[in-house]
Amino acid sequence: MTAVKLSLPAVFILTAVVFIIATLNLAQAQLGNAFGPHYFPMGASVLLLVLSVFYFIRSYKERHQEHKEDEDIQAIAQGRTPYIIVGTLVFGVVYALIFDFAGYIIATLLYLGVLMFIINGKSRWLINILTTLIFTFMSWYIFAEMLNISLP
Amino acid sequence: MDYGYFIDGLMNAITPLNLLFVFLGGLLGTIVGMLPGLGPATGVAVLIPVTFGMEPISAMILLIAIYYGAMYGGSRSSILLNTPGDASAIAASFDGYPMAKNGQAGQALAIATIASLVGGTVAVVGFTFLAGPLADFAIRFGPAEYFLLMLFTLSAIVSLSRGDMLKGFISMLFGLVLITIGVDAQSSVYRFTMGLPQLTEGIDFLIVIIGIYAVGEVLYNFIAINRPPEKKNKVESLWFTKEQWKASRMPIIRSAPLGFLIGVLPGAGGSIASMLGYTTERQLSKTPERFGQGTAEGVAAPESANNSASVGALIPLLSMGIPGSGTTAVLLGALVMLGIQPGPLLFESEPTTIWTLINSMFIGNLFLVVINILLVGLLIKVLDTPSHILYPLILMLGFVGAYTLSYSTIDFYILLAFGVLGLAFKLLRFPIAPLILALIVGHDMEQNFRKSLIVSDGSPSVFFSSPISIVLIIMIILSISVPFILTAVKNNKAKQA
């Protein structure tokens, strides 16, 4: 639980450090104030770093206290929830990889189909298949035909 | 008021196509607002691609109708399921759900609808008289004043969003850091693009919004997907009694202007307005003990205030280009994408657009009463949509929406990354609104900050040089310090007790 709670402030600290270093290496402007493009990102990243470190320390000190968010953090690791979340993300990446060459209809049929089975299991197979088919063709019709949006 | 523009706007608003968009927007908004866990911001974010290819004014009418339709819909799930669709609908559940449990679900829904109609209509009248003068006033703002106004909006949304201010400021600063990615508009220096051409224009905030609201929200809702569904209360009589109306009419009339004024303030918005409407009426009531037990005025007051605030929040959005909440920030993003630049000049250059919108809001409020009363039986069936079908579909709409924005699958990765970030924000109770607001106003904020310094030859005195600036600085200091002062006073009182 502590690791989950500290992960977000750690991401903020890392982001702030990366942006501070990158701002220090930023090219100088040829027009106007040479450091004009530096001020804002530097100010925002330094403040982000200071507040995130402060929050990180506070969260670490309070790690044994009970918080409102504890129930959700515990629930996310229980039952099938972690599989559903990880499956959604992993197959989302696969969807992005195949989208351009497989085309909208095939890629969406595959991704939505997989998603429905991950979430609902095999027992609701008919609903899974029907939802996938109806949504894929309906969304294709609305976007590609009615709204003239070109889909691959 | 210029009646010529009013008539032109009315004529535009009542074209069959625009009437259809108001109706569709109101209906879609009501449905999205009703679905537990999905608020107006998600509704607007997911439905943005539907407006592609439309005339800008029709798209604007549709999006704004979705926005206030969602405010109407928010109370439906509060009353029937005790699960508010959005923070601004929480207060409606205090008495709405007990009413539904007492077999008065239909009365609660009807009184909420009428309260919303009065609140919304009073606010549209307020909009008519206040937005124009505010836009005229905003023309006097220079870059320094705009920078300070944006800073005030950001500090207000952090301090007014209930909870931890430290988390709020971190969320806001994270957004301000992200907006610096891309080519700098003033010097053409490439900042943090890592050589990727896709990042030249910066991260598209609409992708971030869809990622955080649609994907993040769905990932978060997966936690509860296997829990048994809430028991829905039956709707029987669809009209309230004379006694209920008598008890509710003054709370509705009092809460409407109150909500409107709160809505106009940046950072406040529907959730604070509805809470304040509820507590004010409880304090004024001769029988405050009935509040929380299922009393009609306990539903009427927050709903009137909430809808009034949501229209009020459109004033700073349209007249100054400053959104006051997460949802209006999403709306601003959508309008800019449609080629509509809200701000004082919009009122000067396109008065017919503004009047078309005002008239469509009047019509929309009437449509929403029809939708919410006559179609209530059909609408509440939406609550039966199983979440295990709904959530994958919202996710897919998010993907299609992201693709239609730039026709690049690179955005899918950004969408997923921000979905995970949105999940983490929800899990650790970090407020999302300051991040979204920073992403939307951050770019202009930096440009105005630097323009001010160019005008003053680098002297920071430019930020203290006009009475408007001084007032804004005082407001910034107050917005940050008031929560600390209130906590100190509270602690002091507790110690004395």
Image: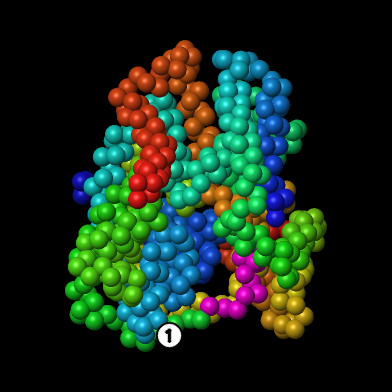
Q: Would residue B300 appear left or right of B247 to someone viewing this image?
A: right
Q: Which residue is drawn at 69% across and 42% down?
A: A11
Give the extent of the magenta segment. Answer: B218-230
Residue B443 position (above or below residue B189): below
- Name, please, the residue furthest toward the bottom: B236
Residue B274 position (above or below residue B243): above
Q: Residue at x 29, y 53 (%)?
A: B260
Q: Which residue is drawn at 72% across and 63% down?
A: A77
Q: Quadrant of residue B272?
A: bottom left
- For disc 1, the marked residue is B234
Image location (x, y in percent) of residue B43: 51, 61
Front in this rendered view, residue B63 or B435: B435
Q: Would residue B16 appear left or right of B189 to someone viewing this image?
A: left
Residue B443 position (above or below residue B23): above
Query: Does residue B346 appear anywhere in the picture?
Result: no
Query: Does residue B167 appear anywhere in the picture?
Result: yes
Numbered disc 1: secondary structure: loop
Image location (x, y in percent) of residue B485: 38, 39
Image location (x, y in percent) of residue A96: 76, 56
Q: Would residue B486 appear left or right of B436 to someone viewing this image?
A: left
Q: In which quarter of the image is residue A113?
A: bottom right
Question: Label 1: few (<14), some or many (≥20) within 10 Å?
Answer: some
Front in this rendered view, residue B170 or A110: B170
Q: Would residue B288 appear left or right of B37 to someone viewing this image?
A: left
Image location (x, y in percent) of residue A57: 64, 39
Indicate the amino acid at tag 1. Lys
> Tag 1, which chain?
B
- Name, please, the residue furthest toward the front: B496
